[in-house]
Image (cartoon, rainbow, N blue to C red):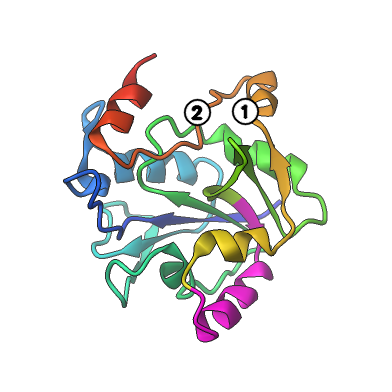
């Protein structure tokens, strides 16, 4: 299965108080850690944000509308593979094996993602590339909420128990939006 990766790094990080993409974890920035993980299963990798990453095999798309959210950023992506894995740069416990696992679950659905506490998690999720055509339509009609777009795709959902059952950390999809969330996710 051919999967390309898209890493979103251009968020405002207002609740974190610092640029999430630049936070250092285990000696590397969060964005670099997630990008390296994506490169294990995704080719090509495109970073969408304000600055490119210093990785020789990562393409870059400058976020044209700073701090307008992930739907706006994803509207810039033109997929070249049948499947696209989208990740935010704040996935502290990202495990690249989640890419392969969601690939086994997607089937004919337009997307596969984790459902957590009743909420879909669209920023650590696998999409069929044709779903990106609907991003442009949603964006053109004024939609700015990624969750609304993703929910309309009728995705296949997996639970944290499903992740745990296949040996994945059940927190691998969780982003850190505040310093407190970051601290909690760093604890084993």
> Which residue is rendered at x = 50% and y = 31% of the image?
172
Chain part drawn in magenta: 126-143
Q: Is residue 137 left or right of residue 61?
A: right
Residue placed farthest to the top in the image? Answer: 188
Comparing 119 with 30, the one in front is 119
**Image side of residue 171 versus residue 34, left or right:** right
Who comes first in sequence, dot 2 or dot 1? 1
Element type at mark 1: helix
Residue at image mark 1: 160
Task: Find residue 127 and report its image quarter.
Answer: bottom right
Residue picked out by circle 2? 171
127 magenta-colored = yes
Q: CA distance from mark 2 to mark 1?
A: 7 Å
Residue 18, image x, y percentages: 17, 46
User: Which residue is located at x 78 percent, y 56 percent?
Assistant: 109
Extreme residue in the right direction? 108
Q: Secondary structure at mark 2?
A: loop
The answer to whether marks 2 and 1 mark residues whose Cβ atoms lie closer than 8 Å is: yes
Q: Residue furthest left?
A: 18
């Amino acid at each position: 299965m051919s999967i390309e990766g898209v890493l979103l790094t251009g968020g405002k990080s207002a609740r974190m108080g610092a640029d999430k993409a630049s936070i250092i974890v285990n000696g590397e920035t969060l964005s670099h850690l997630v990008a390296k993980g994506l490169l294990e299963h995704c080719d090509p990798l495109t970073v969408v944000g304000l600055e490119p990453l210093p990785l020789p095999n990562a393409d870059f798309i400058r976020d044209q509308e700073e701090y307008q959210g992930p739907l706006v950023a994803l509207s810039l992506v033109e997929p070249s593979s049948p499947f696209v894995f989208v990740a935010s740069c704040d996935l502290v416990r990202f495990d690249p094996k989640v890419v392969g696992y969601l690939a086994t679950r997607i089937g004919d659905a337009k997307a596969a993602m984790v459902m957590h506490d009743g909420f879909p998690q669209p920023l650590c999720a696998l999409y069929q590339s044709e779903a990106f055509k609907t991003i442009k339509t949603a964006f053109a009609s004024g939609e700015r909420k990624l969750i609304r777009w993703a929910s309309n795709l009728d995705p296949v959902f997996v639970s944290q128990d499903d992740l745990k059952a296949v040996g994945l950390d059940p927190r691998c999809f969780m982003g850190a939006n505040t310093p407190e969330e970051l601290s909690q996710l760093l604890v084993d």
